[in-house]
Image (cartoon, rainbow, N blue to C red):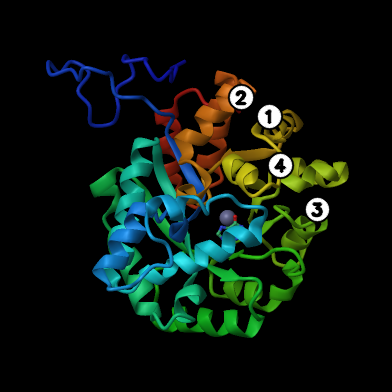
């Protein structure tokens, strides 16, 4: 079986000639090929890009400079992060802005080993600022259209709806997305979880199902385990984003294992938003041991201290993930994706000898 140690130069990167004479001084890091299934494109806005876009658009930011902005990246909970996340979106004004943000993510994700990405965006967060659906969707989609050729990353787009807004608003936006034939594969549910139970969006998810869209939902990040069951039973969610609080309910864990429900776990996010105290306390090892279908994802990498490779590296450093578990996590991500069977087969073959 292949190994994927960072310094294992025997395993070439895609596009790298192993016999080539021009060897880089430092061997390029070799990453596991993974699918990133839980990623908010607006959460990839790095501080430098926030300032660059503000300048391009003549927007005065409420921070004097990068250091002052970075000093705000100390979150006490989900809402404290969301406040900054929505506020920083003000710099996204044109299709070009959305395209630049998307290109920056894909370039970085490719270095992290991401070979397939299912990218959420929050259309309502842009509409409420007076930015049209055409602007935000076309800006992101124009880059996704050639992501495989340009970055070696196959991609698809998921419209996420803000659960702290009304279901009527979500339904209205979904109809507009369908009327404009937006290139979305599915819908998701994000934003403030507590007090906004999944059942609030039953009609939205039924409409999406009838329209042939895939369905995912954040549940069990801050919300109770019952939100996970509700997302499955009432919304027909095919994947659960986060889902870590399932560990409080052994009966639910048994069900999730039996049904192979994918849980898109985001370890660094959980630490930064205080869902867990430290990475050493993260339930991922227990989730793997329980046989849950978990993957590792970055959520909002610009805000939470890292991309998928950073998540893996810190997990390894702190929790000592085995090679077997790393490959299992990568295989879970590929198998749980909405990529074509052909693409999944290709990526699993690249992963080589993925465990069952
Ligand atoms: N949780 C809920 N909503 C979000 C998140 C998250 O981690 N990131 C962006 N919107
Ligand atoms: Zn998320």
In front: mark 3 or mark 1?
Answer: 1
Quadrant containing the C terminus is top right
Answer with mark 2 or mark 1, whichever residue precedes in sequence: 1
Mark 4 CB near ligand 1 (8 Å cut): no
Can residue 64 be seen here? The reply is yes
Q: Position of residue 252 (x, y in %)?
A: 82, 47
How far is disc 1 from disc 4 in space, using C-alphas? 9 Å
Answer with mark 2 or mark 4, whichever residue precedes in sequence: 4
Label 3 near label 2: C-beta < 8 Å? no
Mark 1 CB near ligand 1 (8 Å cut): no
Answer with mark 3 or mark 1, whichever residue precedes in sequence: 3
Q: Position of residue 127 (x, y in %)?
A: 46, 80
| Mark 1 closeness class: few <14, some 14–19, many ≥20 residues within 10 Å | some
Residue designated by label 2: 318
In this rendering, the count of numbered labels is 4
Compared to 127, does 254 lie above or below? above
Instruction: Please identify the quarter of the rendering in which residue 209 is found.
Output: bottom right
Label 1 near label 2: C-beta < 8 Å? yes
Residue designated by label 3: 225
Q: On residue 267, which mark appears? A: none
Compared to 279, does 171 lie above or below? below
In front: mark 2 or mark 3?
Answer: 2
Compared to 303, does 319 lie above or below? above
Q: For numbered disc 3, what is the local secondary structure?
A: helix
Residue designated by label 4: 276
Q: At 58% across and 21% down in the image, what residue appears? A: 324
């Amino acid at each position: 079986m292949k190994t994927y140690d960072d310094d294992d130069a025997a395993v070439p990167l895609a596009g790298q000639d192993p016999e080539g004479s021009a060897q880089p001084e430092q061997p390029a890091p070799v990453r596991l090929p993974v699918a990133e299934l839980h990623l908010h494109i607006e959460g990839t806005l790095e501080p430098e890009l926030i300032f660059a876009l503000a300048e391009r658009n003549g927007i005065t930011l409420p921070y004097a400079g990068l250091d002052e902005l970075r000093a705000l990246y100390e979150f006490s909970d989900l809402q404290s992060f969301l406040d900054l996340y929505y506020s920083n979106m003000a710099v996204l004004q044109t299709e070009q802005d959305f395209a630049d943000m998307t290109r920056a993510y894909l370039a970085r994700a490719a270095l992290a080993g991401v070979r397939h990405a299912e990218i959420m965006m929050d259309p309502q967060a842009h509409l409420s600022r007076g930015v049209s659906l055409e602007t935000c969707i076309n800006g992101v989609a124009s880059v996704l259209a050639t992501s495989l050729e340009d970055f070696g990353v196959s991609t698809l787009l998921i419209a996420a709806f803000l659960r702290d807004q009304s279901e009527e608003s979500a339904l209205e936006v979904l109809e507009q997305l369908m009327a404009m034939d937006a290139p979305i594969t599915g819908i998701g549910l994000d934003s403030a979880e507590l007090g906004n139970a999944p059942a609030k969006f039953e009609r939205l998810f039924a409409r999406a199902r009838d329209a042939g869209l895939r369905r995912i939902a954040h549940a069990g990040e801050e919300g109770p385990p019952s939100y996970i069951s509700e997302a499955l039973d009432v919304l027909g969610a095919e994947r659960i984003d986060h889902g870590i609080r399932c560990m409080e309910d052994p009966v639910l864990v048994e069900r999730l294992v039996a049904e192979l429900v994918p849980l898109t776990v985001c370890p660094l996010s959980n630490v930064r938003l205080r869902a867990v105290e430290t990475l050493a306390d993260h339930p991922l090892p227990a989730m793997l041991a329980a046989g849950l279908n978990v993957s590792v994802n970055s959520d909002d990498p610009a805000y939470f201290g890292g991309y998928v490779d950073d998540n893996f590296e810190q997990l390894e450093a702190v929790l000592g993930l085995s090679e077997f578990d790393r490959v299992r996590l990568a295989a879970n991500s590929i198998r749980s994706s909405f990529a074509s069977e052909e693409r999944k087969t290709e990526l699993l073959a690249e992963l080589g000898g993925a465990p069952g």
